[in-house]
Amino acid sequence: MQAELIKRATELMEDGTVNRVLGWQKGQFVYDITPAVFTSVEDLKENFVYNAFCGDNLSKYLRAESEKEGKVLVFLKPCDTYSFNQLLTEYKIHRENVYVIGIECNGKTSGEDLKKKGIEGILDVEENGDELTVRTIYGDEKVSLKDVESYRCATCKSRKHVAYDELIGEDGDILDSHRFDQVEEIEKMSAEERFNFWRGEFSRCIRCNACRNVCPACTCEKCVFDNYDSGLYNKAAENTFEEQCFHIIRAYHVAGRCTDCGECSRVCPEHIPLHLLNRKFIKDYDALYGDFMAGAEVGQMSPVVDFTMDNDAEPSVVQKGGAE
Amino acid sequence: MQRIGVFVCHCGTNIAATVDVKAVAEAARKVPGVVFSTDYQYMCSEAGQDLIKESVKKYNLTNVVICSCSPRMHEKTFRGAVETVDMNPYLLEVANIREQCSWVHKDKAVGTQKAIMLMKAAVAKATLDTPLTPGMLPVTKRALVIGGGIAGMQAALDIAEAGYEVDIVEQKPTIGGKMAQLDKTFPTLDCSSCIVTPKMVDVGQNEKIHIYSYSEIEEVKGYIGNFDVKIRRKARYVDEDKCTGCGLCTEKCPMKNVPNEWNLNLDKRSCVYIPFAQAVPKVATIDPRYCLMLNKGKCGICSKVCGVGAINYKDTDKIVEEKYGAIVAATGFEISDISKYDEYAYAQSPDVVTSLEYERLMSAAGPYGGHLKRPSDGKDPKTIVFVQCVGSREKDSCKGGKEYCSKVCCMYTAKHAILTKDHYPDTDIYVFYIDVRTPGKLFDEFYRRAVEQYGVHYIKGAVGKVTPNKATGKLEVQASDLLLNEQLHIEADMVVLAAAIEPSHTARKLATMLTTPMDTNDFFTEAHAKLRPVESATAGILLAGMCQGPKDIPETVSQASAAAAKAIGILSKDQLVGNPCIAHPDEMMCNGCSQCAGVCPYGAITYVEKEFRMPDRTTKVRRVAQVNEAVCQGCGACTVTCPSGAMDLRGFSNQQIMAEVDALCQ
């Protein structure tokens, strides 16, 4: 697949369709993939990688990239295309400056996911359909991708691309992957259990801001947590801030806009299951307003901020009495 | 540093009985920023207001906090008071320690504690208050009346009387509304047509009034003083200006079996029709559902017989755009669907009718020319059973029942009984009721006449079942008399159902366009149930007639005149004072996501591409929100939607709300 992507990217660069490529490159280790912009064919051939570790969602980087001169080529996996559409909906990407190649995805793994299965000293990885050949310093290991894939890929919502200019590989389907099972388990807890569960999780937070910085929905000019005037800034010093404010406020801010790409949980160095907060919101939206998937279509607003004059629009109703 | 004065009102015993007002004033003195605090028996009285004014001068106060009733009640009063001593009125805050405190607490210690918290929150907000100046808005000196029934006509006439132009938009081909369909009116029994048709003529002939009949409201934009309205003039296929209303086309039209909605489908009319003889405007309309020319391209008789060439088969809907300063909603009512009450056999027998149908059956202009006949066989009914509250005062909503009382049914049923007995004294009349409700001038006397003078059998009880007997042609009515605790079996010729009244089905769509609130029954909600009963919560929208709640004709007419007076109040001004408490975006913070534009119910937010100098001295074109200050109503929906906190509300800034919450949580 990697060779195929490099070939097509080279063609597009050489015929002048794009002048740079947004993709992935190797870090210190093979599983330390980082997003990168390649400005020359040589750079591309030398450093561009695409393998089972390339989980990073590249769509957020288009916010800055699409503002620059010329067209940028980007490779988007199915789940990334949802973020891409959502960013377009919020006018964050200049679509005319982007050439999107949708690429097939069978699920991604990570160095940590492999280590959990006892595979260490990883040198390289080779994907062959569902089978993964991991070269390690101790010799080759063959595993099924299904066994080692990341949790977010095991509960993948869709293998279908919702945006692309061209496609490499096959387009998949929207999946029923039981992604709300874990949410349901938490819903079953008593209020006290639930509070303790989240307090336990959030107490590990070191406020590195990785979740916020990677999140494709977090695109404010200035985050409320960095804004003195927001009235939140002065609460950051409180030791309950992470437990009771930061993540919950963030979840509210991305509610209805979160495409469930799972980047927040992927990048969290403390392994806090942040995606569960967002999934709870998605589940509630589905229950209250009918199935709604942020980013499924460009221009589709979240049901709570969509005030239309259609027949289904309800004027405000003055209700008698208070809450039950 | 602010110098804040806190004034605690006793409101007689309303507040003082449950809140230790002296303790609240005492506590205020300890809050940073407060330099003066006191309590007084009636802060809204002249003496109370003088106390505020003098204290502002004496203590050099920069802000004032009043602990009293809801700001809805007296904020305006107090703002006016401080304005006279040169304080910006928006530097005053009201802490509601009556409705939100003394009235909901019984324990004085708890009430006092809460009052102190509310006071502290108001002081925290006042500390961040900024002086605000309202803008001035121009006024279009023209009114729109939606609905051409008695309410709409009266409102239009009164506004025109004051010298302003008025447009009436009526969805039917003629104005007149439901009142024109009634036979007689209670309690005087004067002929409805005789009093409503002269009004219709007055409206039609008034130079200041323009009638858009057979038209609907398509779109409403704008705000008080400056509404932009699109009116859809439905294709009538007859040129209104040319048509003389001679009626020749209606006589010659071969399609004569069209259900006549004017007579509630009890008889037939022609396809090209004038609803009734006194229609205004007296112009024919072609019903496109039945016209042979429009549907099959054959016929064209009406066009041939028309002497003035008014028929136009190629007519299309037209949109008229007009500007208005005030809008009166007078959309009226409909009879609710009672098809689910199948125990009354309404759908099974033509002799079971609603009261409005009975009204047409008795009317001289009705299907039987005023001779009361049974619809099934045309025989004179000898026994008639009236059932009250069909669908009214009922909680069982699975049948579409209404919880409210339709208000006019008791009286019109008494009227029907009296009229029937008057014309046909040998008729036996039974009225089944839950309660007989007759408050109103000469109303109870009228009902007593039905019982005592005319011998109508009023029975407290319910009709359980109506069974049409095909063999005898009678309706077997099974009912219970609750006072005698007896089962009754009545062989009736007709059953008349007092079906519940409900707001026009167009009201909900209209409420969305007008951004006016409705209650759960789809009646428009007034701005204040007691003190502003003809105004909607949306400025510039006034309410008249049944669209606000069930009422009889005199009440409707008085409300229409009241709404007209309010409309004239708006139109007579050259400029209106705007509301300065409106949203404004911090453009450097706005990230252009457009969520605020999505939630704005007034369409006040637009987006522009604007060039900005960025902190790193580069320039950048960014998409940012802009608020139309004249359209914004200050509801604050955008401020809570904005994830960046870029959108803020003047007078209720995010910081102020946070400060209030912090004060409450301390």
Image: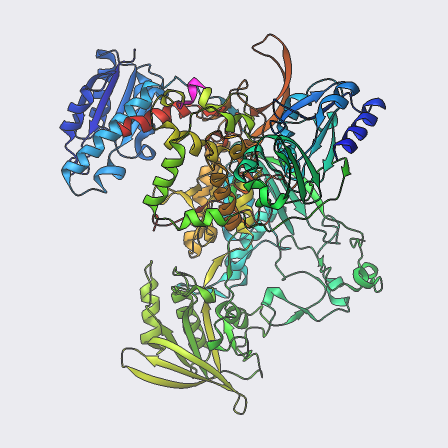
> Furthest residue to the front?
A138
Q: Position of residue B301 (x, y in %)?
A: 82, 63
Q: Is residue A230 one of those drawn in magenta? A: yes
Q: Residue at x 49, y 80 (%)?
A: B494
- State the extent of the magenta-drawn residues as a range: A227-232
> Furthest residue to the top?
B617
In this rendering, position of residue B35 left or right of residue A15: left
In this rendering, position of residue B454 left or right of residue B497: left
Of residue B336 and residue A269, the one placed in the foreground of this image is: A269
> Furthest residue to the bottom?
B471
Q: Position of residue A242 (x, y in %)?
A: 39, 29
Residue B296, picture quadrant: bottom right
Residue A286 visible to an observer of this rendering: yes
A92, above or below B245, in the image: above
Q: Quadrant of the C terminus of chain B?
A: top left
Q: Position of residue B534 (x, y in %)?
A: 42, 43
Q: Quadrant of the N terminus of chain B?
A: top left
Of residue A158 and residue B209, the one placed in the foreground of this image is: A158
Residue B325, picture quadrant: top right
Q: Is residue A288 one of those drawn in magenta? A: no
* Image color mode: rainbow
A292, above or below B498, in the image: above
B211, above or below B59, in the image: below
Residue B17 visible to an observer of this rendering: no
Q: Position of residue B57 (x, y in %)?
A: 25, 12
In this rendering, position of residue B407 left or right of residue B209: left
In this rendering, position of residue B428 left or right of residue A296: left
Q: Residue at x 78, y 55 (%)?
A: B311
Of residue A86 and residue B480, the one placed in the foreground of this image is: A86
Total numbered labels placed on residues in the image: 0
